[in-house]
Image (cartoon, rainbow, N blue to C red):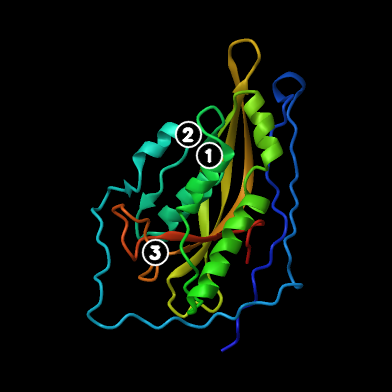
Amino acid sequence: MTNPQRRKRTGLTWALIGGAVLIAGVVALIVNVILGGAANPAAQPTTSPSAPLGGTAPPTETPGTIEVVDPDVAEAGWLAEPITTDPEVYARAALAAASTFDTTLGTRDEWLDYLDTWFTPDSRYADPSDQQMELEAAQLELRQGVVVPEEMWSSIAEQSGRVTAEVVGDVTMADVPEDASGDMRIATANAELTFTQSDGAGGEASYPETVRVSVQVLCGEASVPTPGTAQQAGHCKVVRYFTEPVEG
């Protein structure tokens, strides 16, 4: 079996509004982050063994309803993680969550720690140490190349700003290389971000921006649920956010 190549990290265009937006106009910031590519040799994933017959039954869902892991996170301005086995439903939420925050209700570090709870190890790696290494790399990639950088968070916070995101239009679902289970998918879609900040006169002003984004999700028995919640193995989790949209 051909070993999948190690993750390639390149820059993602993250549309941002600068501190002077509400007075002078809208400023878009292009964030390009390149994290060691060919210089770092890959840990070579191997196919994890399938669960034996008679193992844990897959989770069931009530049609027409979507539970969430923790509805209270909305009080911090964050998007709640859905409990679902539907990869498209989950991917839409995951893509929106990576751009939904309120600087008046929580810090960037708190928000990132929350996003970490959406992740699960990459099941293509059978060795737990390799899984942990890839998990940490994916969470670092999120911080350094996907979400709003710290300096821009500070700029938005100075204007008591917040951002909400929603996936609009179709979601393109693609297979993941070397995924023998068939449980992983790469979802790519357009996300509409709405920036809202103080206008300096007691009111608020908002501005929309659309970005193209991708996320890799695992919706199968190898997913690791968030402890102490209604999530179960088999429910969808995030494996990796990409710094650029994955097309084709």
Q: Which residue is mark 3?
A: 224
Label 1 close to label 2 by CB (< 8 Å): yes
Identified at 31% across, 48% down, the residue is: 66
User: Quarter holding the C terminus?
Assistant: bottom right
Distance from disc 3 to disc 2, alpha carbons, whole Å, reads 25 Å
Dot 1 alpha-carbon crowd within 10 angstroms: few under 14, some 14 to 19, many 20 or more: many
Q: Position of residue 215 (x, y in %)?
A: 55, 58
| Res 10 quadrant in image | bottom right
In 3D space, how far apart are the residues under numbered discs 1 and 3 (Cα atoms)? 24 Å
Q: Which residue is mark 1?
A: 100
Up-down: is 24 above or below 193?
A: above
Image: 35 above or below 40: above
Label 3: state its secondary structure.
loop
In what quadrant of the picture does the N terminus appear?
bottom right
Label 1, label 2: how far apart the Cα atoms are: 7 Å
Q: Can you identify the residue that label 2 sits on?
A: 77
Residue shown at 68% from the left, 43% from the top = 149
- Residue 74 relative to residue 240: left or right: left
The secondary element bearing badge 1 is classed as loop
Badge 3, how many Cα within 10 Å: few under 14, some, many 20+? many
How crowded pointer 2 is (Cα within 10 Å; few <14, some 14-19, many 20+) is rated as some
Question: Sequence order check: which comes first, mark 1 or mark 3?
Answer: 1
Q: Position of residue 183 (x, y in %)?
A: 42, 71
* Label 2 residue SS: loop
- In the displayed image of the protein, which residue is found farthest to the front? 129
> At label 2, which amino acid type do we have?
Gly
Residue 130 visible in the displayed image? yes
Residue at x 68%, y 67% (from the top left corner)? 8
**Would you say 30 lies left or right of 183 here?**
right
